[in-house]
Image (cartoon, helix red, strand yellow):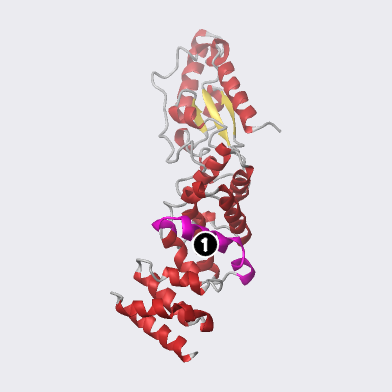
Amino acid sequence: MSSPFDYKLASDASERQLAHPIVDDAFPYRAYSAVHDARTSKSHRAMERLGIGGTNIYYKDDAAWKAFRPPWGPRHCRCGWYPQSVEQAAKLGVQEAKDWWIRAMEMAAEHGGSPYQFLTRTEPPKHQHVTLPPFSPDSVCEPGALYVTDNPLILDDLRSGVEFRVERAMKDLRSLVTCERKHLRLRDALMTVPELIGMADALMKVGKNALVAWPALISCFVSQVSRQHHVERDSRQTLVFEAMRYVLDAGDTTERELILPIWIASEDANPQTLVEILTCKHWDVRKAAAERLGQSGQAGMVALAPLNLLLADRSKYVRAAASDAINRLSAQK
């Protein structure tokens, strides 16, 4: 099978051949053909409906065709294309081609010969171009969305150790961040726990340069938790939470805001980490950490002093949670 790079060369060569004066007039249109299986992203399939009149046909000089002629996009495009004559485009429902072909046939009937001899003389003065698609040819898919079938490809890029592939994978993950800021739903992008573990492991090995990709990965985990209402304990004891600890230490406010709520709710959150979280600027996080410490039993005794400081917190909810946690821990002495 040809690589994406080889296919790009072949596609360019085909376009150059069709630009030859002998065949240029005979094939003025291009037909887009996507592969229809689970691995094909929606944006690539959409190109079959964004041509002239909702068809898969584009005029050869159309800006949309030049931008999205297969293969396009940063990874693994398997779409194809083939040239179309005026007659073929007319049969596929392109009105411009129908009118053009009718004029050529009328002139052929009047003067004798083939309609193809009169295509240049009957060509419309201005060809119909389509609106550029609402997505970028440089994006993996529609803005803010990844697909389940992209996950193994992204993971493979992260593990490759090749700089441009790692950067591409982090760009793919970052495309999630602007999509679902509230983490309620990530469309088709929900990852399974094993995939999350693999991503976390790979990102940890990339190092601090990968911090920009962490918010999207953690938001996927939040979505997983919110949908399933639980994650098996074996999974909680794996690299996902090791990754959370890593970002808690190295990340900025954005990463912390994503991680802290899940970290606090985890059975693997140790009291010392929870004590550190008590200083978080967000009152709901401080409240949740205090409540969690109150349930920690003897292990939570290390938190008595920090909890006492929270009795003067500016939030009445945090003060109440701290007071309740102190009473619980004191009762267990």
Of the residues shown, which amino acid type is indicated by label 1? Arg
Q: Nearer the viewer, residue 280 or 157?
A: 280
Instruction: Determine the main secondary structure of the stretch shown in magenta.
Output: helix
Q: Is residue 280 left or right of residue 162?
A: left
At label 1, counting other C-alpha atoms closer than 10 Å, the crowd grade (few under 14, some 14-19, many 20 or more) is: some
Q: Nearer the viewer, residue 111 or 214?
A: 214
Q: To which residue does mark 1 refer?
A: 245
Which segment is the magenta one? 232-255
**Residue at horizontal 47 percent and vertical 60 percent from the top:** 248
Q: In the displayed image of the protein, which residue is found farthest to the bottom?
A: 331
- Residue 185 place in picture, x, y as percent: 47, 60
Q: Nearer the viewer, residue 326 or 85?
A: 326
Q: In the displayed image of the protein, which residue is found farthest to the right?
A: 1
- Residue 202 place in picture, x, y as percent: 60, 51
Relative to 112, residue 101 above or below:
below
Relative to 101, residue 77 above or below:
below
Residue 11 sits in which quadrant? Answer: top right
Q: Is residue 25 left or right of residue 278?
A: right
- Residue 2 place in picture, x, y as percent: 68, 31
Relative to 245, residue 199 above or below:
above
**Residue at horizontal 45 percent and vertical 68 percent from the top:** 261
Report if residue 234 lies within the magenta region: yes
Report if residue 259 lies within the magenta region: no
- Element type at mark 1: helix
Residue 278 sits in which quadrant? Answer: bottom left
- Residue 144 place in picture, x, y as percent: 45, 49
* The N terminus - image quarter: top right
Q: Nearer the viewer, residue 198 or 180?
A: 198
